[in-house]
Image (cartoon, rainbow, N blue to C red):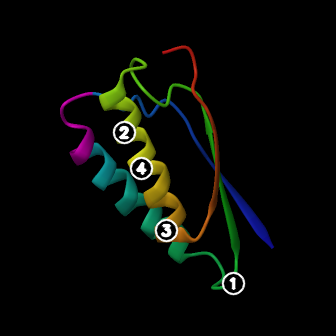
Amino acid sequence: MAYLIQLSDLHFGPKKHDVYKQHLLKLLDVQIARLPKNAIIKFLITGDLMDSPSRKNMYAATEFLNELKRRYHAEVQFVLGNH
C-alpha cells in the first residue's frame, strides 16, 4: 500500500530553517514509524517551497527534498508556489 504525505508552505529561506527542518523531520519520523514496514511513501509538497527564488533558498530546499528521499526511501514531487 502507498501513503501520500502532503506538505505545504515550507518557505525555505529564513535563518532558522535548519531548526524548523529538524523539527519537521522529527514529526515525520513519528508518523512514518506508524506505517507498515514495507509501505511505499510519496511526498507531495503543494506550494511555497521557498520564500523567494534565490540560489541559497534553492540549495536549502533541495537539501530537504534529498533528505526526504534518503531518510524515508520516498518519492518526492513538489510545486514551487507563488513565493
In the current view of this chain or complex, which residue is farthest to the top? Answer: 82
Which callout, 3 or 1, points at the residue further toward the start of the chain?
Answer: 1
Lower sequence index among marks 1 and 2? 1
Q: Nearer the viewer, mark 2 or mark 3?
A: 2
Extreme residue in the front direction:
55
Q: Which mark is residue 59?
A: 2
Q: Nearer the viewer, mark 3 or mark 1?
A: 3
Amino acid type at mark 2: Tyr
| Residue wearing tag 1 | 38
Tag 1–tag 4 contact (CB < 8 Å) = no
Looking at the image, residue 39 sits to the left or right of residue 55; the answer is right
Direction from residue 21 to residue 2 in the image, left or right? right
How much space separates mark 1 and mark 2, taking CA atoms?
30 Å
Residue density around tag 2, few if under 14, some if 14–19, many if 20 or more, within 10 Å: some
Q: Report how far apart the C-alphas of labels 2 and 3 lie in the structure.
A: 16 Å
Q: Classify the position of the N terminus by image quarter.
A: bottom right
Farthest residue to the left: give it: 15
Q: Which mark is residue 70?
A: 3
Q: Which residue is mark 4?
A: 64
User: Residue at horizontal 44%, vertical 34%?
Assistant: 10
Q: Residue at x 54, y 62 (%)?
A: 69
Choose the circle earlier in sequence order: 2 or 3: 2
**Stretch of the chain drawn in magenta:** 14-19
Separation of marks 2 and 4 at Cα, in angstroms: 9 Å
Q: Earlier in the sequence, mark 3 or mark 4?
A: 4
